[in-house]
Image (cartoon, grey):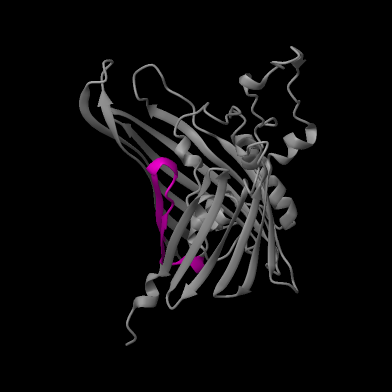
Amino acid sequence: MRFGNHNPATMFLRLTAFLLFTVNFANAQTGGSAVFRFLDLTASTRQSALGGNVISIRDNDINAAFNNPAILNPEMDKQITFNYNPYFAGIKHGYTAFAKNYEGVGTASVGLQFVSYGTFNRTDETAADLGTFSGGDYALTFSLARPVGLDSILFAGASVKAIYSQIDHYTAFGLAVDLGISYQSMNRLTTAALVIRNAGVQLKSYYDGNREKLPVEIELGVSQKLAKAPFRITLTARHLEKWDLSYTDPATQNETDPLTGEVKEAEKVTFGNKLLRHFIISNEVLISKNFHLRMAYNFQRRNEMKVESRPGMVGISFGLGLRISKFHLSYSRSIYHLAGGTNSLSISAYLGDFKRNK
């Protein structure tokens, strides 16, 4: 793809329009309206601390490529990472990846996301014990990114995912593609990105005649590092393919007061609330090269999961990153509900750092 000597901002807008055009077939799908929903789970510890879907931070963290393949760059060469994200109800979730830079070609990576739902008791209609069964989801991802043009401030990337899901003896298989572009200013303080995730097809359904669509999503993000302060602030907009992300609970519609008999109309979701549900705002405090603090606020998570009488810290996440010797360690805590949240741990390293000096 050739762009000549156009202004970088113009190139970014053209690539943005191109990516949006490629998914004009995408239907707005959130909630339970698509298959392979595990693809929406936050794979890395750092991403969990930053609210779940940051796509615009461009540095040497291979985990960022899970959300945006265009983030891959030569600084990730020979980096390997392991993330463990235990979920609710004993569900185990993890992600591992490895990156390699190929001169003249680009930076490539391979990653594996897995979810284990554990073991379930099998019974019949009389509750007779028939043994056990298990379930799990897996996505094997191959990614490649490279600069666009010669100025190295605009980058494009793509990921191909082979998806496998198994529940008891029922299995499903699919293929998906992520497309991303990333812009970084010459002073490396400002970055922007656009990503289209999970555009694909279910090749084999759990049973015949029931193929479902994948959870396609369009995201836009901007990050700004302050020149004279150790802060990097990020704003991410999710689900640009659908305006209204609010959920209407049928149980709360037109409730009747048991004492007066008066019918109370359900509170309508305002324009501002619908707008804010698309956004995640996060901040990294870059205390040093070896120690970072992270925090974020996810508007949609708070609106969907809070208890009205006691919202607490729902929607807030936080964590830290620490380098010890050759290892990069991260921890995060995400508050999903008044009943609790999730903790995540990760470890990353450069394999080249372990070579013995000759």
Q: Residue furthest top?
A: 261
Boundaries of the magenta span: 74-98
Judge left or right: residue 138 versus residue 219: left
Q: Is residue 339 above or below residue 185?
A: above
Q: Is residue 15 above or below residue 346?
A: above
**Quadrant position of residue 56:** bottom right
Instruction: Return the x and y of residue 97 as percentages of the image width and height.
Output: 41, 56
Looking at the image, can residue 110 be seen? yes
Q: Residue furthest front?
A: 259
Instruction: Return the x and y of residue 66 as percentages of the image width and height.
Output: 49, 51
Residue for point 69% across, 71% down: 230
Q: Residue furthest bottom?
A: 358
Total labels drawn: 0
Q: Residue furthest right?
A: 271
Nearer-the-camera pick, 318 or 141: 318
Q: Is residue 216 magenta?
A: no
**Quadrant position of residue 299:** top right
Judge left or right: residue 9 versus residue 76: right
Judge left or right: residue 114 versus residue 329: left
Q: Is residue 79 magenta?
A: yes
Nearer-the-camera pick, 55 or 251: 251
Work out which quarter of the rendered image holds the C terminus and state it.
bottom left
Nearer-the-camera pick, 71 or 139: 139
Instruction: Return the x and y of residue 61 as percentages of the image width and height.
Output: 51, 63
Residue for point 47% across, 35% down: 37
Instruction: Return the x and y of residue 68 as percentages of the image width and height.
Output: 55, 51
Looking at the image, can residue 139 be seen? no
